Image (cartoon, rainbow, N blue to C red):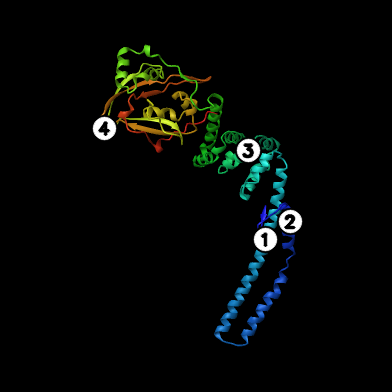
């Protein structure tokens, strides 16, 4: 605690000392100063005149106001000292339940207002909750990151998830806090659940974040009629990759003519890089939105683990003026990635020559935030 710029090692003791000193102040001690000023005004009254009378009357009001201000000030200081001693005593009692050095080191960095809120949140929570707060590293930091939401910050299961995420991603604190704060109150629990779950998945199945082992279980190019394959090859700017594109689906791609202005969409993790300049995998907006409110969003889109996110930015491309092309639609295949599986099932639109399309642009209003299934 700091007081007058000095570090106080015993806040409760100092508060009690201030309280005792304030209690010892007697209003009578203020009397001599007021009496001396009154005598000055009485002397002026002996020389009557409008100016002197106004001065004395105004001065009298000032004295009365000063007297009551001092009285009220002493009352406020007294109450402050009483409250401070009481609050610090309660805090001291609560902190005795925590032994983890990480807990105490982080707690000291909280503001006074935050410390009082922490006391209100957990003073009566009981030993089981206190044990959770003391057991995992970073719990106070997690509580501070969720400070704007009393419901979430009082839930130790949510805090455990946030703590684990922040310990695993020490530089992500500010980003997490900003996104948490901008999330609507009734969805913040979902945000915590999804952020934690996908971070756990990445660490378990793709710790390097390089899509290692990601394998679509779609059809082989040999299953596609030659006429369809030839049409796709005629559209493709890089036909050497066509077999892999076909393998991303479980149905034979269907040709769909597209004219200028035709628009397609793609999701990427929110705040991350936009779509690759060569990726052929896109979707129609209604198809994307039909799964956007489902907890199985990532499953239906067959997303690689590194593409999983609590929220998604949506990008769009448009066919350039004067262009006429064929896109090819197929059902997304199920996938396997180092033991983790997705079901697939959504319909994808395959764009085989991106040079005929505009550069991707983000559509802020189309952001997708699926619910949590936890």
Q: CA distance from mark 1 to mark 2?
A: 12 Å
Q: CA distance from mark 1 to mark 3?
A: 35 Å
| Contact flag, marks 2 and 4 (Cβ < 8 Å) | no
Q: Residues within 10 Å of mark 3 (few under 14, many from 20)?
A: many
Which of the two discs, 2 and 4, sits closer to the camera?
Answer: 4
Which of the two discs, 3 and 4, sits closer to the camera?
Answer: 4
Percent position (x, y) of residue 321?
A: 26, 32
Q: CA distance from mark 2 to mark 3?
A: 31 Å
Q: Nearer the viewer, residue 242 or 186?
A: 242
Per the rendering, the mark at residue 321 is: 4
Under circle 4, the secondary element is loop
Per the rendering, the mark at residue 16 is: 2
User: Which residue is under mark 3?
Assistant: 139
Q: Quadrant of residue 240?
A: top left
Q: Quadrant of residue 150?
A: top right
Q: Residues within 10 Å of mark 1 (few under 14, many from 20)?
A: some
Under circle 3, the secondary element is helix
Of the two numbered discs 1 and 2 on the same chain, state the one appearing first in sequence. Answer: 2
| Contact flag, marks 2 and 3 (Cβ < 8 Å) | no
Of the two numbered discs 3 and 4 on the same chain, state the one appearing first in sequence. Answer: 3
Residue that appears at 58% across and 80% down: 55
Q: CA distance from mark 2 to mark 4?
A: 79 Å
Of the two numbered discs 2 and 3 on the same chain, state the one appearing first in sequence. Answer: 2
Q: Nearer the viewer, residue 193 or 102?
A: 102
């Amino acid at each position: 605690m700091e007081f007058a710029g000095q570090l106080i090692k015993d806040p409760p003791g100092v508060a009690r000392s201030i309280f005792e000193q304030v209690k010892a102040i007697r209003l009578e001690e203020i009397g001599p100063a007021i009496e001396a000023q009154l005598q000055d005004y009485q002397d002026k009254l002996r020389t009557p005149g409008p100016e002197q009378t106004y001065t004395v009357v105004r001065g009298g009001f000032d004295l009365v106001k000063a007297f009551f201000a001092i009285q009220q000030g002493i009352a406020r200081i007294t109450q402050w000292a009483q409250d401070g001693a009481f609050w610090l005593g309660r805090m001291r009692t609560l902190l005795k339940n925590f032994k983890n050095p990480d807990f105490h080191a982080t707690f000291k960095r909280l503001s006074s207002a935050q410390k009082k809120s922490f006391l209100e949140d957990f003073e009566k929570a009981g030993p089981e909750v206190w044990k959770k707060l003391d057991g995992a590293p970073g719990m106070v930091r997690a509580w501070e990151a969720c400070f704007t939401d009393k419901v979430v910050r009082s839930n130790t299961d949510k805090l455990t998830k946030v703590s684990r995420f922040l310990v695993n991603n020490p530089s992500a604190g500010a980003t997490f806090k900003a996104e948490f704060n901008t999330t609507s109150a009734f969805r913040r629990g979902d945000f915590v659940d999804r952020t934690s779950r996908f971070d756990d998945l990445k660490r378990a199945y793709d710790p390097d974040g390089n899509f290692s082992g990601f394998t679509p279980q779609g059809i082989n190019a040999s299953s596609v009629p030659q006429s369809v394959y030839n049409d796709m090859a005629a559209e493709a700017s890089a036909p050497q990759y066509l077999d892999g594109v076909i393998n991303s689906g479980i149905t034979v791609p269907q040709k769909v003519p597209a004219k200028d202005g035709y628009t397609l969409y793609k999701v990427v993790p929110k705040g991350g890089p936009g779509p690759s300049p060569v990726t052929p995998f896109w979707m129609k907006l209604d198809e994307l939105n039909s799964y956007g409110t489902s907890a199985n969003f990532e499953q239906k889109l067959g997303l690689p683990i590194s593409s999983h996110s609590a929220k998604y930015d949506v990008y769009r491309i448009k066919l350039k003026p004067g262009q006429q092309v064929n896109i090819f639609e197929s059902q997304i295949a199920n996938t396997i990635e180092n033991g983790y599986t997705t079901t697939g099932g959504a319909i994808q639109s395959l764009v085989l020559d991106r040079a005929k399309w505009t550069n991707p642009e983000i559509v802020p209003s189309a952001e997708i935030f699926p619910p949590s299934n936890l």
